[in-house]
Amino acid sequence: MKKEIREQFRSRTFERDKYRCRMCGFTPTAEAWKCEKPPLDAHHITDRNLMPYGGYVHQNGISLCPQCHEFAELYHMTGVPHPGYSPADLYAKVSSSYDWAVQMSFGLAPDPEEGLEVYKRLVTLQTGERKLLYYLDPTLRTKPTVDSWLLACEEAGETDPNILLYGKGRY
Ligand SMILES: [Zn+2]
């Protein structure tokens, strides 16, 4: 993952959130931003390993203070959210959604032609919830749904929607 993409993710997330923690409202001073360690984190609402191209888009990000970041990370570590800090809660705070974040992440494809074969994956999370993580044709920019995944499987000759298919350019 390129450094510029990571930096852009952080700066766009912080800008949108007006440099404050979106959960508790903590607003670091300008001085604090000059420290080596930034006073807020740009948290990936859905883990970067579960998103197309790492999900480095502000639609998948939220600015959090260290304490709120710990609460949010609990879900990634255990599959059980801290009350009020589930991915759905965080997406709601920033007026985004999992689907929207996935869709926007396809815009990170370094080579759209290469992306065509890549995104075909449906997984069952620890919570038992099934999520479409990869979509068949990123150039379509349409909203991925379980139905569109099943259709994509059918077109690709796959019958098991849980099968993991990795193509070129997997991150
Ligand atoms: Zn906070």
Image: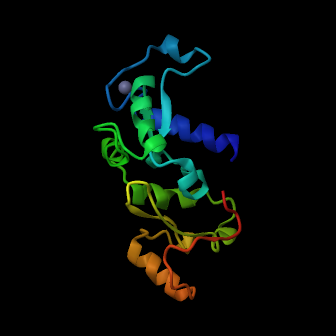
Picture quarter with ligand 1: top left
Find the residue positioned furthest to the left. 84
Residue beneath the point at 52% across and 70% down = 135
Q: Is residue 127 above or below residue 5?
A: below
Q: Is residue 91 above or below residue 10?
A: below
State left or right for residue 84 relative to residue 135. left
Q: Is residue 121 above or below residue 19?
A: below
Occupied quadrant, residue 115: bottom right
Residue 57: horizontal and vertical position, in percent?
Answer: 52, 48
Residue 133 appears in view: yes
Occupied quadrant, residue 150: bottom left
Residue beneath the point at 70% across and 45% down = 2
Residue 144: horizontal and vertical position, in percent?
Answer: 43, 69
Residue 122: horizontal and vertical position, in percent?
Answer: 49, 68
Q: Nearer the viewer, residue 161 or 20?
A: 161
Number of callouts in the render?
0
Residue beneath the point at 44% across and 31% down = 69
Q: Is residue 123 above or below residue 76?
A: below
Residue 56 appears in view: no
Residue beneath the point at 43% across and 63% down = 131
